[in-house]
Image: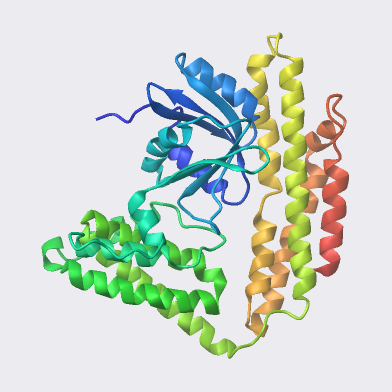
Amino acid sequence: MADLDIGMEKAVLKKLLGVSKKDPVHCAVGVSKGMGVILLDKIKPSKTLSKDLEKKFADIKNPRWGTASVDVEEDPKLVILILNKPAPGLARALKKSLKPAGYSKVEIRDEEGNVAETEGDEEEEQAEAGAAPTSQAPAEEQPQAAAQQQPPEETAAAPDQAAPAEEQTQAAAPPAQQEDPAALTKELTDLIKQVVAAIGADPSRGATLKGLAAGATTDLKSGDLAGARSGIDALRAALAQASAAAAPANGAGGPPNAPALGKAKLAWTAARKKMESELDKLHAEMTDHYKDSAFATQLDQVFSTKIEPILTGLDETLSEKLDAVLSNTDPSQHDKLVADARQTISQYESYLEGEPMIAKLDSNPFVPLAIQKTMTATLAALSRVVA
């Protein structure tokens, strides 16, 4: 049976919702034939997406626009939509459309941040509230509650994170009939208890450990016992690796200049968000200016080919490098990690100097921009403190 058209391909939807775990993405939503429909984009303004959605679905009801994000600290399966105005029943319709992408809950908020509507999976909500499984529930469903009670981390695992490992080990995995669901359930539950302690000792491993636990739980619940066995084995190995890495540290703290490094990371994140916001404004202004021109049909393509590479060239790699320095507890690794971060700063500086499109953007007649000045100054300041 073919997938229902919800406005965009499932793979693209999953990718952009993954991106939204770091920064919200633009969105437009509505209801067509009782099904929630949605469009997401990193650059294209939400009002433009709404027009695209209305063109794609002539019968659309309650078209709305705003931003979409997954706040993994709140709930890695919850998609939060901040819209220009709420619409009754929209969350329920969208929940059905988002579930195939691995997200089972939808919360709609107004532009002031007030919650207007929430829809979630009843079984998951019971698990999160600590409700015990009913007596009729299969044994393999029991780890679901335990997995969802673990503390959320900075980056939630992708809903299908366990799939590659499953594909690689499928031939070597024992036949499904040789596995005991109850035994697997107990084994996974015991490992999940260890995940809590491992995350407490090293929060940077949270995303990996939670992802493996969630993948094994999903396989177990769906009856894929071979996949569950692979996931459990992978989780056990990851826990052993975390334990081995923690042992040499002997409680050693982070780098002595951790506060300055933390501020450096925040400065880079703020500079990137400012750049993205200004580019969004430029896109909106140009869209409005050229709406009656033949160039309007080419504008999105121009932004995709000329502007998006700038966001890639000045990406989140530096934040990740600084995270590695901050979370490191092995003094012998400090200099190497700092060198990696400084190399990334140098690469960004070279990119700023050599990309002619940045100067063209800064001199555009629509929106005042200062990408070159802002980013250069930020990187110079970071270079002084990253040591």
Q: Is residue 39 shown above or below 189?
A: above
Visible residue check, residue 57: yes
Quadrant position of residue 322: bottom right
**Residue at the (19%, 61%) spot, across then down:** 138
**Residue at the (20%, 56%) spot, across then down:** 223
**Residue at the (68%, 72%) spot, across then down:** 326
Q: In the rendering, at what x and y percent does residue 145 appear?
A: 35, 63
Residue extending farthest to the bottom is 250
Q: In the rendering, at what x and y percent does residue 277 appear?
A: 74, 39
Visible residue check, residue 387: no
Horizontal relation, residue 142 to residue 98: left or right: left
Horizontal relation, residue 163 to residue 225: left or right: right
Horizontal relation, residue 54 to residue 84: left or right: left
Q: Nearer the viewer, residue 6 or 331?
A: 6
Q: In the rendering, at what x and y percent does residue 74 appear?
A: 54, 57
Please tell me how many numbered marks the rendered image carries.
0
Q: Nearer the viewer, residue 158 or 248?
A: 158
Quadrant position of residue 113: top right
Residue extending farthest to the left is 177
Q: Nearer the viewer, residue 247 or 358?
A: 247
Q: In the rendering, at what x and y percent does residue 105 appear?
A: 44, 46
Report the quarter where the C terminus lies.
Answer: bottom right
**Residue at the (58%, 24%) spot, across then down:** 50
Report the coloring of the rendering. rainbow
Q: Is residue 223 shown above or below 139?
A: above
Q: Is residue 201 shown above or below 265?
A: below
Report the quarter where the N terminus lies.
Answer: top left
Horizontal relation, residue 374 to residue 2: left or right: right
Q: Is residue 113 shown above or below 242?
A: above
